[in-house]
Image: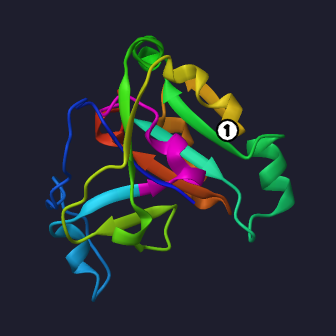
């Protein structure tokens, strides 16, 4: 397994722990997740961050509990799907993100969608610039799907799929 952090910054030499920009309501005993941390994503879930930073997106995949009919309906033959508003497609094609590989030993697994955190500074092992982001999904078994609006996909949270919404506050008509 490998861990990565994605950024628009091409020159990060050390990742310093910092609190999240917009704190979330956390379960009792996990409030520390809003505190100073370095965040990473595992290689199985790195597709979640192959987007310009502020790009709103909804990502789905099956869990062991997902009913087969829902898996077939929503995923067909892919392992995951990434929904993005059509207005972001040009930026996906043209922008570059920087993928930093991080040492696994410095991180603890949150057991949630491939997310890991470190409570101390972390020095990256490697840096790779990724461009033409729209071409990064298919090799990972992820279908990139463009839609006019993410709003009609709110019902996905009522399915047996795993659903992650990232930067939805930036979606055109998200409430």
* Range shown magenta: 41-55
Estimate the x, y position of residue 103 in percent, counting from the top left.
39, 60
Q: Residue furthest bottom?
A: 29
Dot 1, crowdedness within 10 Å: few (<14), some or many (≥20)? Answer: some
Question: Considering depth in this image, is 121 or 17 the residue closer to the camera?
Answer: 121
Q: Residue at x 49, y 44 (%)?
A: 48
* Residue 95 as seen in the image, left or right of residue 82: left
Residue at the disc numbered 1: 140
Give yes or no for residue 27 being in the magenta stretch: no
**Quarter of the C terminus within the rendering:** top left
* Residue 157 as seen in the image, left or right of residue 90: right
Q: Residue at x 47, y 37 (%)?
A: 151
Instruction: Report whether residue 104 is seen.
Output: yes
Estimate the x, y position of residue 149 in percent, counting from the top left.
48, 27
Q: Residue at x 62, y 31 (%)?
A: 137
* Residue 153 as seen in the image, left or right of residue 32: right
**Quarter of the N terminus within the rendering:** bottom right
Is 80 situated above or below 127? below
Estimate the x, y position of residue 129 in percent, counting from the top left.
40, 26
Question: Considering depth in this image, is 52 or 116 the residue closer to the camera?
Answer: 116
Instruction: Report whether residue 175 is seen.
Output: no
């Amino acid at each position: 397994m490998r861990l990565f952090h994605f950024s628009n910054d091409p020159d990060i030499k050390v990742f310093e722990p910092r609190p999240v920009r917009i704190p979330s309501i956390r379960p009792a005993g996990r409030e520390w997740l809003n505190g100073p941390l370095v965040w990473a994503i595992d290689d199985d879930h790195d597709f979640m961050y192959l987007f310009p930073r502020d790009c709103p997106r909804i990502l789905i995949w099956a869990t062991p509990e997902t009913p087969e009919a829902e898996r077939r309906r929503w995923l067909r033959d892919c392992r995951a799907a990434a929904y993005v508003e059509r207005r972001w497609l040009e930026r996906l094609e043209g922008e570059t993100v920087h993928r930093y590989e991080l040492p696994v030993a410095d991180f603890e697994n949150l057991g949630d969608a491939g997310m890991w955190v470190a409570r101390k500074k972390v020095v990256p092992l490697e840096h790779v610039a990724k461009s033409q982001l729209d071409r990064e999904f298919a090799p990972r078994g992820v279908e990139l799907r463009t839609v006019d609006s993410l709003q009609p996909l709110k019902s996905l949270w009522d399915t047996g799929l795993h659903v992650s919404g990232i930067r939805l506050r930036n979606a055109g008509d998200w409430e």
